[in-house]
Amino acid sequence: MNNFWEKIDTPLFVLAPMADVTDVAFRRIISKYGKPDVMWTEFVACDGLYATREKVGMKDEDNPLMQSLLFDKGEHPIVAQLFTSNPERMEYAAKLCADLGFDGIDINMGCPDRSIEKQGSGAAHIKDPETARKVIAAAKKSGLPVSVKTRIGYNTEEIDTWIPELLSQDLACLTVHLRTRKEMSKVPAQWDLMPRIVEFRDKLSPNTLILGNGDVESIEDGEIKIKESGCDGVMIGRGIFGNPWFFNKEKKNITAEEKIKAMLEHTRLYEKLLPNSAFNVMKKHYKAYVSGFDGAAELRAKLFATKNADEVEKILRTENLLKFD
């Protein structure tokens, strides 16, 4: 097994997997303006990928979920995040990802979405360690290094039981969102708990990298959290919205004009690379791109009414916001 995690330098600053956010178009923009140490896809349903087997005449490439597994060679190392509670379907999906050229498999064991939990996936794994072990073992059959992203507990903090359970599975990397499932993202991330997690790692699985997730506001903030907690790196989610330069340590003081230009470029890529996806998914980014300057709210309102990239560009030119282009 070619385990890229064993060769990567720490501390690590990586991109979080986010549904309807970290698609191939968004990752392409981030790769251009400020590439993280490791890329993650948005999370993908193994059950949906496995459906290809159950439909006569359907090929993997015909499955609409395959668009979530598109990536560019410039994104390496890139990890495919998958979710399921069915080991057979995880084995199928993980091997598919290996064939596609991914560098690793990450299993989502922290998503609090009710529809995901009803499938026994996401945060539901915290309540069912036996199934979690089986799903991890199935992913390892792909030959790719396997990591997990999880939380500190379900209703209450369960570090002393849940984290050792995962570390006993010889993971390449473990990312811990420092909130419980019940807390969602409604309370501050509990970074004071990370040293305990690192201590368990040192005792139980010294080769497993530990990443922290939650409330990392900047590279500088991440560096402080890494130093104070002892983890190997941080995963950034919401902080990347509207700021493709987040991981670029050399780029400071991004202007509104630069953000607007990147937004249009992002929109064009979205249409080109994901032609079958709803344009409203792209428009979710506009609130983050268009903020912090006079007239931003009014401009956002106009952009939210658009139906394609041409309409977006027309508005920006009418508002004289592409004069630098």
Image (cartoon, rainbow, N blue to C red):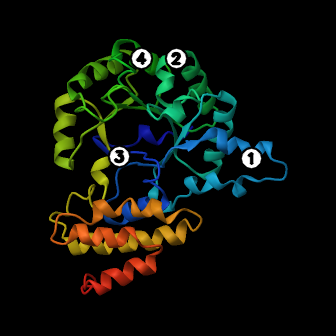
Determine whether label 2 and label 4 are within 8 Å by CB: yes
Tell me if residue 95 can be seen. Answer: no
Residue 198 placement: quadrant: top left
Please state which amino acid type lies under the numbered disc 3: Val
Please state which amino acid type lies under the numbered disc 4: Trp
Determine whether label 4 and label 1 are within 8 Å by CB: no
How far across and how far down the image is residue 243, in percent?
28, 60
SS assignment at label 1: helix
Q: Which of marks 2 and 3 precedes in the sequence? A: 3
Local crowd at mark 1 within 10 Å, few (<14), some, or many (≥20)? some
Tell me if residue 171 can be seen. Answer: yes
Q: Which of marks 4 and 2 precedes in the sequence? A: 2
The residue that appears at 36% across and 71% down in the rendered structure is: 303
Per the image, the residue denoted by label 3 is: 14
Q: Which of marks 1 and 3 precedes in the sequence? A: 3
Per the image, the residue denoted by label 2 is: 129
How far across and how far down the image is residue 199, in percent?
29, 18
SS assignment at label 4: helix
The residue that appears at 50% across and 39% down in the rendered structure is: 3
Per the image, the residue denoted by label 4 is: 162
Per the image, the residue denoted by label 1 is: 52
Local crowd at mark 4 within 10 Å, few (<14), some, or many (≥20)? many
How far across and how far down the image is residue 105, in percent?
53, 39
The CA span between labels 4 and 3 is 23 Å
Q: Please identify, in this view, whether the residue under mark 3 or under mark 2 is nearer the observer.
A: 2
Q: Please identify the residue farthest to the top as the structure is shown.
A: 161
The CA span between labels 3 and 2 is 26 Å
